[in-house]
Amino acid sequence: MYYQRPQSSALNILGVLLFFGVAVVIVLVLFVHFVLGRIGNSFSGEPRTFREYNLRGNQFYQQGAYKRAVSDYTHMIELEPNLNDGYLLRGMAYYKLGDYNRSVADDTKAIGLATIPLVRADLYYNRGLGYKGMNRWDEAIADFGTSIQYRPENYDAYEGRAWCYMEKGENDKAIRDYSVSLSHTPNDGNTLMLRGQVYVRKGDNTHAISDLSRSIAIHPNYPPTYALRAEAYDHTGNYAKAAADYAKAAKLEPQNAGYRGDVGWYQYLDGKLPDAIANTKQALGMNPSLTYARFNLGLCYATQGDWNTAETEYRIALQQAKPADLKGALQDVKDALKKQPHSSALNNALSLLSHSNAN
């Protein structure tokens, strides 16, 4: 095969880690290895041959003009329909466009035409990414596994498969695959963060804190990792450290009202009521519709015994609360009453929220 690939030797893919309760956006970087070397030349003018369409398509790809790249790669396929090259490249361009169905279809066609094992390894990996993009975890896992069979040192495939296992809740398998990748690059801060996330989900807080702390040491300016570690500290009851980690996340991302609200919540749990009130007010100043923070502010005032102020905050929160918000706020008051069973303010809060919940 004499075709040329786009110049970079890897395709960066950013993924989003979502946690519910505390919304965390975390960025995932994967790499799609290409089979041949880098592009060594370029093309100008109107292409006519397979190679010329290949070269100009790669230029469009490099420029981010993926639709134009698709057009040129389609011409490659029309000129040489029995070569895998055009399908492989067009599949990559479709992937960049977020058109995972067409990307998978082209990868499937290319797999049927390819005979070189390393090319097949990359094609199965690419198709695995397409299935992953469609949340078709089992098919993605199968393709990443086949890619590994063709090329056991394809550590990106281990990471892709680990992500899918994580999404399926198969935490031990996800940890295993992330660990294989880390055996190759032990100081990869991104992979440490991802394995730490799985440990958090598994409830293995000791290993979670270890991985996330190592990741933070490598990438100290990435807020979601602090939020993940705060969750692990929460599970261990170390609310002071959880508050400190959210404070670091909020400093790095000052426009994130959720982070600031979480600082206030963990300061409340740590018994630092004046600080909790200050940070919760700051969060609400940034986003007045942050219902959980409004409930938390009412709880802080009720815990202090200031029912008049607490009632005002609770009634504002009730105007915008969803059933899940109200349920959580009611449980928080019940937990607070375990420590202060005779607090009139907390008992008033319990009465108000219980009545609202019944309606």
Image (spheres, helix red, strand yellow):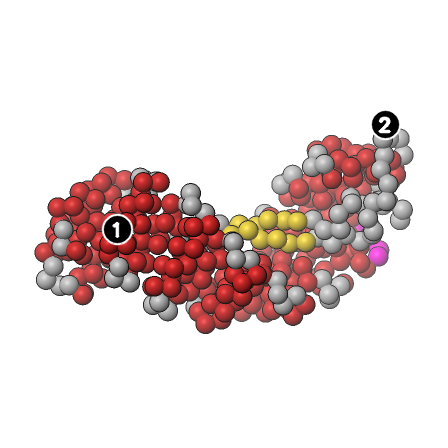
In percent of the image, x 25 and y 62: which residue is there?
271
x, y percent for residue 104: 68, 46
x, y percent for residue 103: 69, 44
Q: Does the magenta stretch include residue 203?
A: no
Dot 2 corresponds to which residue? Answer: 46
In percent of the image, x 34 and y 68: which residue is there?
237
User: Magenta part mainly helix, strand or loop?
Assistant: loop
Q: Is mark 1 on a helix, strand or loop?
A: helix
Above or below, 211 against 129 in this view is below
**Residue placed most toward the observer, 269 or 3:** 269
How crowded is the residue under tag 2: few (<14 C-alpha within 10 Å), some, or many (20+)? few
In percent of the image, x 69 and y 37: which residue is there?
64
Residue at the top extreme, as displayed? 46
x, y percent for residue 47: 86, 30
**Quadrant of the image for the C terminus?**
top left
How crowded is the residue under tag 1: few (<14 C-alpha within 10 Å), some, or many (20+)? many
Q: Earlier in the sequence, mark 1 or mark 2?
A: 2
Q: What residue type is labelled 1?
A: Ile
Q: Give the range drawn in magenta.
A: 112-116
User: How far separated are the C-alphas under marks 1 and 2?
Assistant: 66 Å
Above or below, 226 against 199 in this view is above
Q: What element carries label 2?
A: loop
Q: Which mark is residue 277?
A: 1
Tell me the mark number nearer the camera, choosing from 1 and 2: 1
Q: Are marks 1 and 2 in contact (CB under 8 Å)?
A: no
Q: Which amino acid does label 2 sit on?
A: Glu
Taking 269 as reference, is 253 left or right? Answer: right
Taking 239 as reference, is 179 left or right? Answer: right
Res. 8 in view: yes
**Residue placed most toward the observer, 244 or 7:** 244
